[in-house]
Image (tube, grey):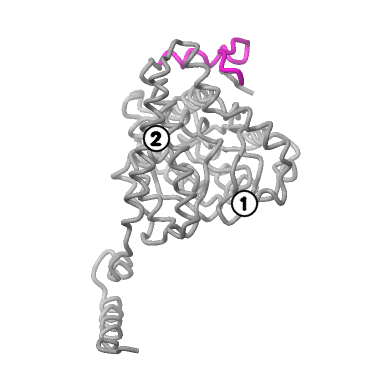
Amino acid sequence: MVQLLSPEGKLVTNDRSAEFLPYLERLGDDDYRKFYRDMAVVRRFDAEAANLQRQGQLALWVPSHGQEAAQVGSAYATKPQDHVFPSYREHVVGMIRGVDVVDILRMLRGVTLGGWKPEEHGNFHLYTLVLASQTLHSTGYAMGIKFDGATATGNPETDEAVIVYYGDGASSEGEANEALVFASSYQTPQVFFIQNNHWAISVPVTRQSRTPLYRRAGGFGMPGTQVDGNDVLASFAVTSKSMDDARAGRGPSLIEAMTYRIGAHTTADDPTKYRDPADLAAWVKRDPIVRFRSYLEGLGAPSDFFASVDEEAADFAADVRRRALEIRGPEKSIIFDNVYAEPHPLINEQKAWLDRYEASFEGDQA
């Protein structure tokens, strides 16, 4: 497993880390602070969103507590021209790519048909609630990039690649394996990023696979790497290498980020029914934010920096709450507007029928 930061926040120097440490030369102090800031802010947002769901403002919430380092590190390894296909837990990846997190809340409140337009938000595609289907979407898109000649031109500033996020549970789905077959066959410019948080709702990863998930890559003819998913620097470095390889025409690869889902699968789940509290406590001690804070303190980051991040996170969460409470349902025309690209007589007829039906209740006091 690739690890660049120990659980105590010390830089790891060994034969395995040596291959990836040079990628940290791409980062400066401002980048390190952005990493910490984004992890801290999204955790505070995550808690606020869970509270909003409990208060009846959202239909569902999908926590990301504990998986911040895997997501932040990998997100910053992408370039503006790359395309990102998320599952439904990559809140901070969306934030980094330019998505307003309140749009995620709108989607989980059920008042939008998707939440945002990918081309207007850093090529961050829509959340996918159907398990593993995004792996096929991303592979098809990566095939299109290759067929269009938009990758492997020799110019890393314009060459495009694709990254797709999914979990250990989704890795057991047929779609994920079909995507790996096509990606390998067509040598797509693509990175498969598995966040192994150890649980597919209540099913442990040990029941899903008798071997580490990254080893499956070899069976499809592509390289696989296991990374410490609670180490933001390792996540950045390994993903940077894999994305560089994809853009350069060296084909797809797979990353397994070893992390842990500290909270519930969703707010509809009760993990106390199936999870060992001792196992949870052990992973809480490996908190990715605490680890990276220790590293930054070792570099000399002042205490007022961390205080300012805490203040920013609290302000961010308060603003999210205020705007979430202002969310209103859409106009009924949204039901019809995007069925066809052009006006259609059947849709026009159905829309007119709904108008007549609603008008029939005018003046009804019942």
Q: Is residue 24 magenta?
A: yes
Residue 64 % position (x, y): 52, 41
The N terminus is located in which quarter? Answer: top right
Q: Residue at x 59, y 13 (%)?
A: 12
Mark 1 highlights which residue? 174
Q: Is residue 44 magenta?
A: no
Residue 266 % position (x, y): 56, 51
For mark 2, give the secondary structure. helix
Q: Residue at x 47, y 30 (%)?
A: 74
Label 1, label 2: how many angstroms apart (C-alpha)? 39 Å
Count of number-bearing discs = 2
Q: Nearer the viewer, residue 337 or 262?
A: 262
* Disc ID at residue 11: none
For mark 1, give the secondary structure. helix
Q: Height in image: 268 above or below 90?
A: below
Label 2 crowd bin: few (<14), some (14–19), many (20+), radius 10 Å: many
